[in-house]
Image: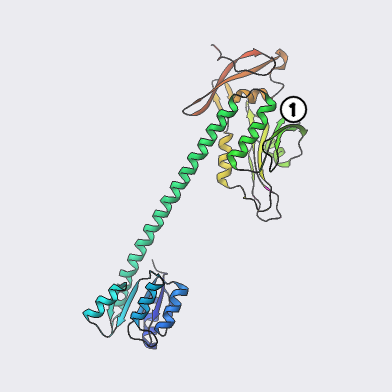
Amino acid sequence: MAGELILVVDDTHENREFLVNYVLEPQGYRSLVARDGREGLEMAIEHKPDLILLDLQMPRMDGLGVLRNLRAHELDIPVILMTFHGSEEIAVEVYRQGVRDYVKKPFTVQEMQAAIDRSLGEVRLRRDKEALTERLIQSNRELQRRVQELNVLYSVGKSVTGILDLNELMPRIVDAAIQVTHAEEGELFLLNEGDQLMRRAFRRNGARQALPVSEPAANPLAVQVVATGEPVTRTPTAPSDQPSAVYAPLTFGGRVIGVLGVINRTPGARAFTRHDSALFLDFLKPPRHFGHAPCSFAGAGFPVGLVAALRSESFPRHGQRLIMRCQFGSGGLQCLPGRFVARLRGFKFGAPAIG
C-alpha cells in the first residue's frame, strides 16, 4: 500500500535526492524534504507525515532535538534515524524517544526500503485496527438507534390501535409519523366518495399535535403518490429548493385510499435521508394478505380495520363496514378478516369470521 507521505530531514542535498529519487518515488510514496532539524520539525507539525526519515547530525536542531520536540507536541509519527555514527548509547536513546528503526550510513536502496516497510507495516496495522474499531462502534450505534426506533414504532402502534373515533385517529397517525421520522410537519390525505383527494389531518411546525381538517388537497407530491401508488422522497440540493419531504400511500384491497406525508420545512433543516425514508416506509409497510383479505398495514401498528373504515363508502349498500381484529405478536401487528357488524355510532373490532 504505497501513497503514504514521508518526510526526509537531512542537511545533505545528495542524501535528500537519493532518498526521494531512488527510494521513495519508485515505490509510489509521496515525499517532503527539509534541510535541517528545525525546518523538519515545522513541516512535521504542519503536514503530519506518515513516516519521517531523520538524520542525526544537523545544524540548528539535531535528530534527538527533533525527536524530543515531536514528543512534546504529542505527535506519534514513526521515525527512522539515519547516521554515520552508531553506538549502543545512541541506539538506546533514540529508541527511548520513539524511533522505529535505525539505519547506518551509507545504506543501500534495499536496506532503506526494508526499514520503511517495517515501520509503515506497524502504522498500517494500527490504522486497520483503529478503522475496524470505529466501524464496530458505528455499527453498535446504528444497532442501538434501530432498537430505539423499533421501540418507538411499537409504542406508537399500541397508542393508535385502540382509537375508534376517526377525528381522533387521523391526527394521532400524523403525530405518530412525525415522531417516528423526527419531522417538523405532517399531513394525511384521503380519497372521498368522488375520488377527490382531501386533507383530513395536519400538523404545522411548532404545533404540539395534529388537528383534524377537511379540505381539498393541492399537494403535487400527494397527487403523484395516488397516481403511481409509489412513495416519493424529496431531498433538496440547495437552500432555495422546496422543503424535504416523504410521502407514502395508504392502501386497502390493492387500491390507494390515501397518502401520509412528513415535511421538514425550516431553511437549513435536516434533509430526509434514505434511512428516514426506509423508517417511514416501515411505518407503512407494503400490502400483505391474510386469508382472502388483501390489506396494507403499518409496522408501527396502523390498524387495518380502521384503514378500511376510513373509506366512508365501504359496503354502503348494506350499511355495514368490514371490521378487522388486530393484535400484536412476535411479527408485529397482525390483522385477520373480521365479521360484518351493523354500522353504528363509532366503530368496534368484531370477532373473527367463522368458516
Q: Is residue 72 left or right of residue 281?
A: left
Three-letter code for the amino acid on which mark 1 is drawn: Asn
Query: Residue 241: within the magenta?
Result: yes
Residue 349 visible in the displayed image: yes
The range drawn in magenta is 235-243
| Displayed quadrant of residue 184 | top right
Q: Position of residue 257 (x, y in %)?
A: 68, 29
x, y (%) of residue 205? 69, 43
Which residue lies at the image location 58% right of the left edge and 43% below the top edge?
277
Q: Residue at x 56, y 13 (%)?
A: 353
* 338 over 111 or under it: above or below: above
- The answer, for residue 296, to whether it is visible in the render is no
Residue depicted at x 64% and y 35%: 175
**Most foreground residue, 179 or 17:** 179
Q: What residue sits right under mark 1 in the picture? A: 192
Q: Is residue 72 left or right of residue 264?
A: left
Judging depth in this view, the residue of 289 and 299 nearest the camera is 299
Task: Specify the principal SS of the magenta part.
Answer: loop
Q: Is residue 268 above or below residue 110?
A: above
Near-viewer residue (216 or 26): 216
| Position of 58 relative to 269 (above/below) | below
- Label 1's element? loop
Is residue 183 a member of the stretch shown in magenta? no
The part of the image, by quadrant, that contains residue 10 is bottom left
